[in-house]
Image (tube, grey):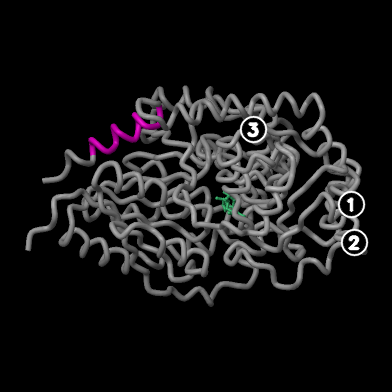
Amino acid sequence: ESPSRSPHIAILPTPGMGHLIPIAELAKFLVSHHGFSVTFITFAESASNAQQAFLDALPSTITSIKLPPVPLSDLPSGTAIETLISLASLRSLPALRSILLDLQKSTNLVAFIADLFGADTFDVAKELQIPPYMFFPSNLLLLSLLLHLPDLDTKMTCEFKDLPTPVELPGCVPIPGTEILQPLQDRSNECYSWMVHHGRKYREATGIIVNSFSDVEPEAAKIFSQSPPGFPPVHLVGPLVQTGLPNVEGSECLKWLDEQPSGSVLYVSFGSGGVLTCEQTIELACGLEMSGQRFLWVIRSPSVKASDTYFSATSKQDPFSYLPEGFLERTKKFGLVVPSWAPQMQVLAHTATGGFLSHCGWNSTLESLSHAVPMIGWPLYAEQKMNAVMLSEGTKLALRLRPREDGVYGREEISRVVKELMEGEEGKKVRGRARELQAAAVKSVAYDGESCKTLGDLVEKWKKSVM
Ligand code: UDP
């Protein structure tokens, strides 16, 4: 039987909802607008309920195959997420090879796409003569850092946090060393070496597809559009944000929002993996209460590890028990606290939502600006601190909180910045900027917009390679 003529793409998303959501949007677009078919190759370890439900809900032209589980029990407990995911990719190469071989026989396989921790899989794709692409679910700032990292690594003699001046990447906002990507903060940790290794491997990609657009980081976009030597072509296709959302009518959050005045509510959430310490949870609660502003807070049980729910997004204990005495009672007229998870896209789309206190995850950022919602940056881990610097100093979409000397955000500061965002002059400025970025985002992905054209060119290239 001859394979059907539709072009086929194989995609390997590494674990994490923040990686899966935007790449699934790309897949849906290829299927619905260009008649492609797609196979997702997923890691057994990443099959959290949320991820499996998400994959199951995709159109039938997008199928998924699970890689066999790879043993990681030889790694010490406390091994960094980045190391775990990188090793899982490396140890899955033989299984990936046989899946790609099968797909080559049964489909018109035109490209293989891995994401930011999966660059080791390029070797297998290249051996099978399938062009390897990288899907980068973050921004040009982080991409630039990783592409330059092998050089920085040979030049640097200290830790990033001890650098006397901020790190300057071409066309990017200077980033103080302390705010640089978290897994690079300890050069003796294995995850640092993994990131240097990935940065080197990225250069082998046929192209790098980035979920950003030029209006959020115009200077960096200009630099990459001039094809800097030694780097693969970079294709800006963002913002890709979730569409075809599940029906959440009747959700407690949305019903509550329906009763609040337009633009009056601050949405507070730290992404799929973020958790605060006990102390920080109490400061946040007191700060919100002191601000007197309406809020919708997605709360998780505190932990000392900021990425504690990365693989599950659920709280381990009753998160409400960590709130200050009487907090829920005192704030029930103007606040709603929900455990673990909220339908974020619908919350941001709601007219009552007027601000977002956010961990600055890249998907959350794109979702916020797509709904013209200005932000307060409260970064926790991964590249979130870099994003917060860029969003406040470059893009000017976010206000920033200043930590106390012990690194904690105090209640007075939280209250001050929340009031500023919702009612102050600085708030007005970032709100205006959010509206501009929303308009630019709509334009970019619309027919004939920059991102739409870039993706169209890629599609043409892939279609041409079908025999
Ligand atoms: N999300 C959600 N509800 C929540 C928390 C997160 O729907 O309560 C979604 C959010 O809309 C976004 C993704 O999960 O699409 C989080 O991605 P992001 O890059 O912002 O952060 P990460 O979770 O990767 O840190």
Q: Is residue 392 left or right of residue 458?
A: right
- Front residue of 364/155: it is 364
In this rendering, is residue 327 above or below 132?
A: below
Q: Are marks 1 and 2 in contact (CB under 8 Å)?
A: yes
- Magenta stretch mostly in which secondary structure? helix
Residue 209 magenta-highlighted: no
Q: Residue at x 41, y 61 (%)?
A: 57
Q: Residue at x 87, y 47 (%)?
A: 287
Q: Which is more foreground, mark 2 or mark 3?
A: 2
Q: Residue at x 77, y 67 (%)?
A: 319
Amino acid at pointer 1: Cys
In this rendering, is residue 193 above or below 391?
A: below
Q: Position of residue 31 (x, y in %)?
A: 29, 48
- Front residue of 288/450: it is 288
Amino acid at pointer 3: Met
Q: Which residue does the numbered mark 3 point to in the structure image?
A: 390
Q: Which residue does the numbered mark 2 point to in the structure image?
A: 324
Q: Marks 1 and 3, how far apart in space? A: 28 Å
**Ligand 1 has an atom within 8 Å of the beta carbon of the residue at disc 3:** no
Question: Which label number is shown at residue 286?
Answer: 1
Q: Marks 2 and 3, how far apart in space? A: 33 Å
Q: Are marks 1 and 3 in contact (CB under 8 Å)?
A: no
Residue 459 magenta-highlighted: yes
If you read the primary sequence from the N terminus, does the residue marked by circle 1 or circle 2 appear first? 1
If you read the primary sequence from the N terminus, does the residue marked by circle 2 or circle 3 appear first? 2
Q: For numbered disc 3, what is the local secondary structure? A: helix
Q: Which is more foreground, mark 1 or mark 3?
A: 1
Q: Is residue 269 left or right of residue 330?
A: left
If you read the primary sequence from the N terminus, does the residue marked by circle 1 or circle 3 appear first? 1
Magenta stretch: give its range. 450-461
Q: Position of residue 19 (x, y in %)?
A: 49, 53
